[in-house]
Amino acid sequence: MFLSKLLLNPRSKQVMNEINDPYQMHRTIMNAFYNGTEKSGRVLFRVEISKRIPDITLLVQSELEPDWQKLIDKFPAYLSEKENKYEYKKIILSVRSGQRLRFRLRANPTVKKITDGKKNGRRVGILDEQEQKEWMKRKAKAGGFKLIDCTVVDEGFVNSQKNSRKLTLLSVKFEGFIEVIETGKFLNCIQSGIGSAKGFGFGLLSIAPA
């Protein structure tokens, strides 16, 4: 698995448009992986914007090694003009049961509602903060870990478009501390991501030593 950190160009019209339409950012990111013959594997990403620092950071987690030069060649103004435009490294995760970690996750917490004319219902965003925490607890249990402490930041709705379909997605940031319960499930959870709308910048679970 590989983790990349890219500095995006805040003066790029394309970058600013894609922040507001994350599926288009997903398509841009895939230029670093897809070569026309091989599958790209799972790719997760998250945009981090700091109010104190004008930089826009893009984190990308991928199964395959990226070739960011392909993206630069196609979109020369996409990355920051600073000397260190991007960096990436291969990571081998090693965790143990009982280990406590800091975490950050931007997710699209949803629940399925049965509606007329739709066999499987439709996903709607969970708006209540306590219900959002309960959603996170369920995902943690399924992912082989448990929440120790968690803050919830409702980031509002994100509008995007996939093909001709327009979507409105709820964005919620979860941060805090977790404890690893089942290492196998937990590692699979990190690799697969959490929740829905992963192609729209959701689901990347970042961890660090507590």
Image (cartoon, rainbow, N blue to C red):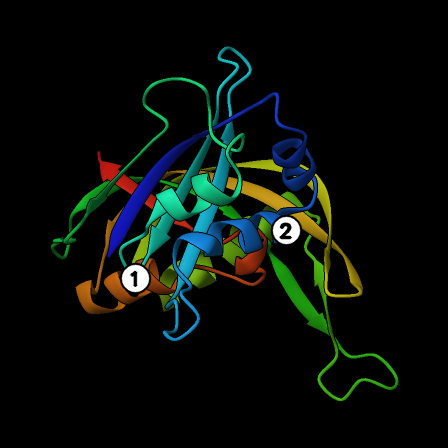
Answer whether residue 201 is visible to the viewer in this image.
Answer: no
Is 95 on the left-hand or right-hand side of 45?
left
Residue at 66% of width from left, 31% of height from top? Answer: 16
Residue type at numbered disc 2: Gln
Which residue lies most toward the top here?
52
Q: Of 118 and 50, which appears nearest the observer?
A: 50
Q: Residue at x 42, y 63 (%)?
A: 34
Q: Amino acid at mark 1?
A: Glu
Q: Which circle marks residue 167 in the picture?
A: none
Pointers 1 and 2 in contact (C-beta within 8 Å): no
Q: Which residue shows up at 51% across the image and 10% down it?
A: 52
Is 173 placed left or right of 98 in the picture? right
Residue 81 position, x and y percent, is 45, 19
| Residue count near mark 1 (Cα–Cα under 10 Å), binned few <14, some 14–19, many ≥20 | some
Q: Quadrant of residue 111?
A: bottom right
For the C terminus, the quadrant is top left
Q: Mark 1 or mark 2, which has the lower sequence index?
A: 2
Image quarter (top left, top right, bottom left or bottom right) of the N terminus: bottom left
The image quarter containing residue 88 is top left
Percent x, y for residue 78?
A: 53, 33
Local crowd size for mark 2, using a 10 Å CA cut-off: few (<14), some (14–19), many (≥20)? many
Residue 137 visible in this rendered orientation of the protein: yes
Measured in 3D between alpha carbons, the distance from the residue under mark 1 to the one under mark 2, in whole angstroms, is: 20 Å
What mark, if any, has residue 24 been given in the picture? Answer: 2
Q: Disc 1 designates what residue?
A: 63
- Asked which secondary structure carries label 2, the reply is helix
Q: Residue furthest right?
A: 116
Q: Percent from the top left, x then y, of residue 98?
A: 15, 52
Q: Secondary structure at mark 1?
A: loop
